[in-house]
Amino acid sequence: MWDRRLTIKVSDPLDRVVDLRLREALLQIRESFGQSFTSAELRSRIPGFKTQVGIYKPAGSPHALWVRQTLKGPYSDEDLYWHPDGSWTYRYSPEEREGKSIEELHTNRGLLQCQADKTPVGVFRQVSDPTGNSTYKVMGLAYVEGFDGTHFVLRGEALDWTALPVPEQVTPVFQRFEVESPSLVESLRIQRDRRFTTVIRELYRGKCSLCTLGYRVRGRSVGLEAAHIIPIKDRGTIADVRNGLLLCQNHHALFDEFGWTPDEDLRVRIADDPEFRSSAAANHVLDWEGKTLANLPRRSEDFPAQEALKWRLAEFDRAWA
Ligand SMILES: [Zn+2]
């Protein structure tokens, strides 16, 4: 029997990286997307990770392998922001030496070569936690989109890492449902869903969209989950953050049972069911009725999509009809 699943080949830009050691390092960086580590942890995790800061181009490689931004760096980098496909933009300062053009330094040239060949680089950003310890957040892999005169424009891989991210100026069309075959979606689900959760956590800054609760223990956000507005079982997309919300476990469970839903204006609707309402009386959930969701992404481009909310609302009404 011919098994279609065996013929599925996902194209991966890393397949073009011929040096196996470099490819292994890049794969590890992609795997670690969104996690934070100390330098020592990164040394044991990423092949070749030592004390390099700034742009790292291994000897003999035409390409830069990663950039490592430090809090004390001499150059001004700009803040990072997200896009609906789960990619991000980050403007990273080139290395400069008095009066030299950017092409004269081999590290900068390594990034320009990545741009020319569409070879991704790893990105690490130093962050300090409330205890004052510094760690590096792994931002995964990025494409060098260009040089804007002062900064390299780095663009993170999309949730669907097999496709290039859409150009920065374009808001991608929201596709409610997975477009690939169910078997391909199945084979990519674990990695995609983990990336989806990571990006939703970033966009909602680690707090429940409904109640704004957020807990952090030992530098990790706990008790929060990415909810799918159109569920995975209905083939709702996990390649676009506009099909998601970050919710605490309680509010996620109630959301899944249609105890509440956001309407198309992101106002909270509560099920008109006497049993649910009396059981929820001690819970704050009734206090939010009619109010706009308290915690949303900074940029309205990343808000839940109208098409997903409409779908949810119809299901909500059907559940209580
Ligand atoms: Zn909550």
Image: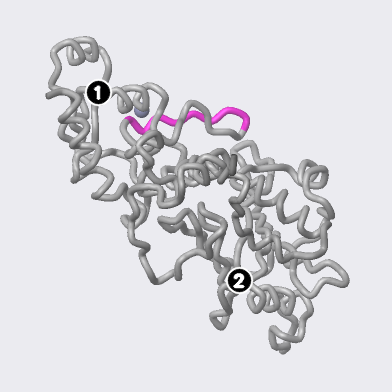
Q: Which numbered marker is on residue 144?
A: 2
Which residue is rendered at x = 12% and y = 24% of the image? 321
Where's residue 28, x and y in %? Answer: 72, 49
Which residue is rendered at x = 77% and y = 41% of the image? 41
Which residue is rendered at x = 42% and y = 24% of the image? 249
* Quadrant of residue 104 within the rendered picture: bottom right
Residue ranking furthest to the right: 59
Secondary element at image label 1? loop
On the rendered image, what quadrant is the N terminus found in? top right
Indicate the quadrant of ligand 1 in the picture. top left
**Residue 238 or 245: which is nearer the viewer?**
238
Residue type at numbered disc 2 = Val
Whether disc 1's CB lies below 8 Å from ligand 1 is answered: no
- Asked whether the viewer can see residue 269, the reply is yes
Q: Which numbered marker is on residue 113?
A: none
Q: Which numbered marker is on residue 259?
A: 1
Q: So how many labels did they put on this image? A: 2
Task: Report the magenta stretch's main SS.
Answer: loop
Please report contact status of discs 2 and 1: CB closer than 8 Å, yes or no.
no
Residue type at numbered disc 1 = Gly
In the image, residue 188 sits, relative to residue 149, either above or below, namely above
Highlighted range, magenta:
211-218
Where's residue 175, x and y in %? Answer: 34, 54
Earlier in the chain: of badge 2 and badge 1, it is 2
Specify whether residue 78 is painted magenta: no
In the image, residue 174 sits, relative to residue 166, either above or below, namely above
Secondary element at image label 2? strand
Where's residue 271, x and y in %? Answer: 17, 23
Please indicate whether residue 206 sits to the left or right of residue 142 in the image: left
Q: Residues within 10 Å of mark 1 (few under 14, many from 20)?
A: many
